Amino acid sequence: MSKLGVNVDHVATVRQARGTAEPDPVTAAALAELAGAEGITVHLREDRRHIQDRDVALLRQTVKTRLNLEMAATDEMVGIALKIVPDCVTLVPEKREELTTEGGLDVFMNRHLIKKQTDLLRQGGIVVSLFVDPDLEQIKAAHRVGAHFIEIHTGAYCEARLPEQKQDELKKIDQAIRAARKLGLGVNAGHGLNYQNIRNVVALGGIEEYNIGHSIISRAVLVGMDQAVREMVALVKGG
Ligand code: PXP
């Protein structure tokens, strides 16, 4: 059965808007775990716009499930990961001007750099996942550079408006899941998933973990973290 990883970046975004100590993403992570989340994800961006180094260090000490650190494939970030030793690192592309991660990693074009960083992380005892579009070339490249997992970028499916476009994007995700599993890669998924659009993805099967942030934190603002996480856990488990 699939697991839910909750991304608590948006809690830090609210904190940073005032530059105070609240709300604390570390507290949000604990509440998410109590509500049934089986992983906590944070993205330590190079510009530190939301999650701070202090958050990652505290989460390493307090997370009881699994800590997944999303980060760019830079030497600075790999150095931090090797010190903190999260359970998993998910390498993502990062542009300073974007609102959120916009596309998957181009593993094929950047294979030398990504292999070097993947090797270092693996040697440090960290599971490595690569955030990629549902594209066969990228999945094969992820396998070749030695990743343990891919995380399929579900953004195109979530943003598709017409039913036939949605169906096409869902088919790409399905093919990506099968191709990755055939190569022996674990498969996670995330980006843009909410309480409605996740149902079709769950029905495909084959995904180990969903990493979801925006929709859960948005709902938590209105109904509380506990209810927001419990409802998403139920969906991820096929409810
Ligand atoms: N997975 C990755 C790799 C991401 O970059 C993000 C966004 O930070 C997510 C999952 C979560 O996306 P969302 O906030 O849209 O649920």
Image (cartoon, helix red, strand yellow):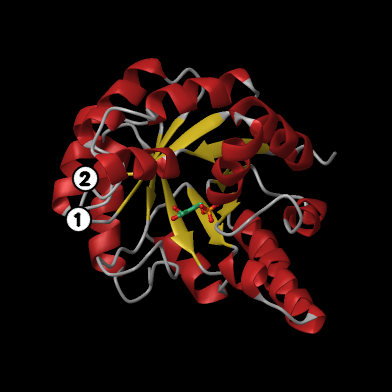
Query: Residue 7 placed where, x, y %?
Result: 48, 41
Q: Quadrant of the N terminus?
A: top right
Location of the C terminus by quadrant is top right
Task: Mark yes or no: residue 197 visible.
Answer: yes
Side (left or right) of 201 relative to 56:
right
Q: Which residue is mark 2?
A: 78
Horizontally, residue 206 falls left or right of residue 211, namely right
Is label 2 within 8 A of ligand 1 (CB to nearest ligand atom)? no
Residue 37 visible to an observer of this rendering:
no
At label 1, the amino acid type is Thr
Camera-side residue of 4 and 12: 12
Residue in the image at 21% along x and 45% along y: 78
**Label 1 crowd (10 A; few <14 / some 14-19 / many >=20):** few
Image label count: 2
Q: Does 201 appear above or below 176? A: above
At 49% from the left edge and 20% from the top edge, which residue is drawn? 30
**Tag 2: residue type?**
Val
Residue 121, image quadrant:
top left
User: Is 26 above or below relative to 150?
Assistant: above
Q: Is residue 164 left or right of residue 37?
A: right
Pointer 1 with pointer 2, Cβ within 8 A: yes
What percent of the width, then of the height, locates residue 36?
A: 65, 24
Q: CA distance from mark 1 to mark 2?
A: 6 Å
Label 2: state its secondary structure.
helix
Looking at this view, is 151 or 221 the one in front? 221
Q: Which residue is at a point 24% across and 65% down the rendered structure image? A: 96
Image-quadrant location for residue 232: top right
Q: Secondary structure at mark 1?
A: loop
Q: Which residue is mark 1?
A: 74
Task: Tell me what residue is drawn at x 60 percent, y 36 percent.
Answer: 220
